[in-house]
Image (spheres, rainbow, N blue to C red):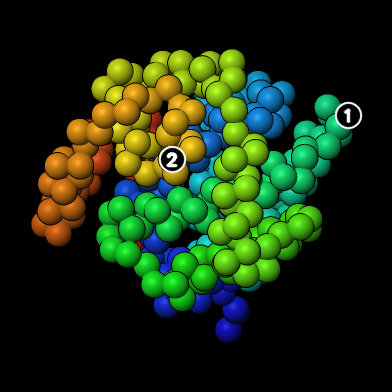
Amino acid sequence: MSTLFVPVDSIVRKIWGKADTTLFIFAGAAAEFALNKAVDWLYFTGRLPADPLSRLFSTVTYAGQIIFSEEGAAIKSIDKITAIHQTVEKNRGAQIPDWAYRDVLFLLIDYSIRSFELLERKLTDAEKTEVFEVFYRVGARMQLKDLPSTFKQWQHMREEHLQQNLLCSTFTMDLYRQYKKHLGPLRFLLLKQVQLMLVPGKVKNLLPIGKTTWLKPILNCYKLCRLLKVESFLRNALLPAAYRVQIKGLDR
């Protein structure tokens, strides 16, 4: 029997096995990608500003594929991601900063935890450590430098990265204009509300998303709908039609 990259009973599979939790991770990633000081790398190919939803969704989808794959297939997916980035570096004639790679890994850890806790329940320290260890293995396979070796070290480095590597730039404002263009006004408003509830204070303060949160009562209603198994109707109403099949595929 083939070994799974992430065991069947892992909390990581539970987090990434529901489409709505994965969508919240997507929302957090959309916020931090826009603020990252290395976001110019994502503009280099032109794919991000042309279709930011697909570009960001592909990052989240790759992570999900790795989590639910057998060991060998997961390693191939990780190696493919590494090769794609190496090609971009070669074409630009420069290297993506090590801290930028770590930032993406770190935000996937953080928003996995934050999204599950917002929609489900608080995680134990052991479960948070499990989330960290899965993504640490991804980063180690990618040969990322200076990775934290424990969850506690990650917490410290995550805070440092938040303070040092984020900036509200012209790229940030352009990306948010693109988000609004591709989502439409109502879905864009909901994205910003989710981000206000989800992201760390540093991210919230830098983003052009306002300060007032009115989504919490609606979120509580949504949680009730999940218990009644009718959440897919509401979820589909909040998503562009082009993504509904992809989002449905995230329910595992």
Where on the picture, by quarter, is residue 183? Answer: top left
Q: Earlier in the sequence, mark 1 or mark 2?
A: 1
Judged by depth in the image, the label closer to the viewer, 1 or 2, is: 2
Q: Height in image: 42 above or below 180?
A: below
For label 2, count other residues whose C-alpha is less than 10 Å away and answer few (under 14), some (14-19) or many (20+).
Answer: few
Residue 77 seen in the current view: no
Side of 60 where 118 appears, left or right: left
Point out residue 124 in the picture as x, y percentages from the top left corner. Answer: 39, 72
Q: Could you tell me which secondary element the residue under label 2 belongs to?
A: helix
Point out residue 36 in the picture as x, y percentages from the top left corner. Answer: 61, 33
Instruction: Look at label 1 and name its amino acid.
Output: Gly
Point out residue 137 in the picture as x, y percentages from the top left corner. Answer: 66, 66
Out of 183 and 146, give the one closest to the viewer: 146
In the rendered view of the protein, which quadrant contains the N terminus?
bottom right
Point out residue 4 in the picture as x, y percentages from the top left corner. Answer: 56, 74
Q: Verify CB contact (< 8 Å) between mark 1 and mark 2.
A: no
Q: Height in image: 155 above or below 190?
A: below
**What residue is shown at x 43% (from left), y 58% (from top)?**
113
Q: Residue furthest bottom?
A: 1
Residue position for label 1: 93
Side of 127 where 144 appears, left or right: right
For label 1, count other residues whose C-alpha is less than 10 Å away and answer few (under 14), some (14-19) or many (20+).
Answer: few
Residue position for label 2: 201
**What residue is shown at x 66% (from left), y 30% (from top)?**
37
